[in-house]
Image: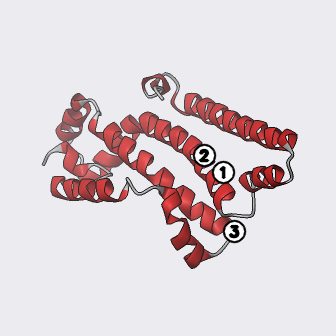
């Protein structure tokens, strides 16, 4: 059994290929295009926004997690085979610890995407949140208030990235440096 067949992303190579087809068919759908469906199903409010944001964020996490698992050092998998670890223990003891620093980078990327999509949903249709505040300030012809909202969104994005970067370095130490590209 190849080590990739025991990856957390796919149970088998066949299932992994089928999942790739599904991901590549659904991923290109802009999350904002789902607004009418989400609005009908969930109505105005944060539930609708959370669903749209989750749809936008799941793809980078899934794709980068898969890449992280596939980039695990082959010698680690040889060790797991030499130790005769069953697939579940191989995933828990080898694959997850080796891939987690890079998977955390996917979480950092998705946090930025979440902020962008959340503000966009609020601007487009949700009457709650910072995006809605920007639109209300625009309608009131208050560029100062619009700029204040933009600065506040920038501060939130920066603080979120700093918090996730600090968490990444605290959790993974030197291993975090290997997955710090984006």
- Does label 3 or label 2 sit earlier along the sequence? 3
The residue sitting at 38% across, 37% down in the picture is: 99
Using the rendered image of the protein, determine whether residue 94 is visible from the camera's viewpoint. Answer: no
Labelled disc at residue 64: none
Q: Position of residue 82 (x, y in %)?
A: 17, 37
Residue 116 marker: 2
163 or 43: nearer the eye?
43
Q: Judge whether residue 147 can be spotted in this image.
A: yes
Residue at (28% x, 60% y) in the render = 22
| Left or right: 159 in relation to 136 | left
Mark closest to the chain's N terminus, 3 or 1: 3
Categorize mark 3 by other alpha carbons within 10 Å: few (<14), some (14-19), many (20+). Answer: some
Q: Which residue is mark 1?
A: 119
Q: Are marks 2 and 1 in contact (CB under 8 Å)?
A: yes
93 vs 51, nearest the viewer: 51
**Would you name the residue on which mark 3 appears?**
45
Horizontally, residue 16 falls left or right of residue 150, namely: left
Does residue 36 lie above or below 167 as drawn? Answer: below
């Amino acid at each position: 059994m190849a080590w990739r067949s025991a990856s957390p992303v796919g149970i088998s190579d066949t299932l992994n290929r089928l999942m790739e087809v599904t991901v590549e068919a659904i991923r290109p759908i802009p999350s904002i295009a789902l607004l009418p469906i989400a609005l009908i199903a969930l109505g105005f409010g944060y539930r609708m926004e959370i669903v749209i944001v989750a749809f936008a964020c799941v793809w980078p996490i899934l794709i980068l997690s898969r890449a992280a698992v596939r980039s695990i050092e082959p010698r680690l998998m040889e060790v797991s085979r030499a130790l005769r670890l069953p697939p579940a223990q191989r995933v828990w003891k080898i694959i997850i610890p080796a891939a987690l620093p890079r998977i955390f980078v996917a979480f950092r990327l998705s946090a930025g995407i979440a902020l962008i999509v959340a503000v966009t949903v609020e601007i487009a249709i949700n009457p709650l949140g910072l995006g809605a505040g920007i639109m209300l300030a625009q309608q009131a012809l208050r560029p100062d208030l619009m700029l204040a909202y933009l600065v506040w969104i920038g501060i939130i994005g920066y603080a979120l990235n700093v918090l996730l970067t600090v968490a990444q370095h605290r959790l993974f130490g030197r291993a975090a440096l290997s997955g710090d590209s984006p």
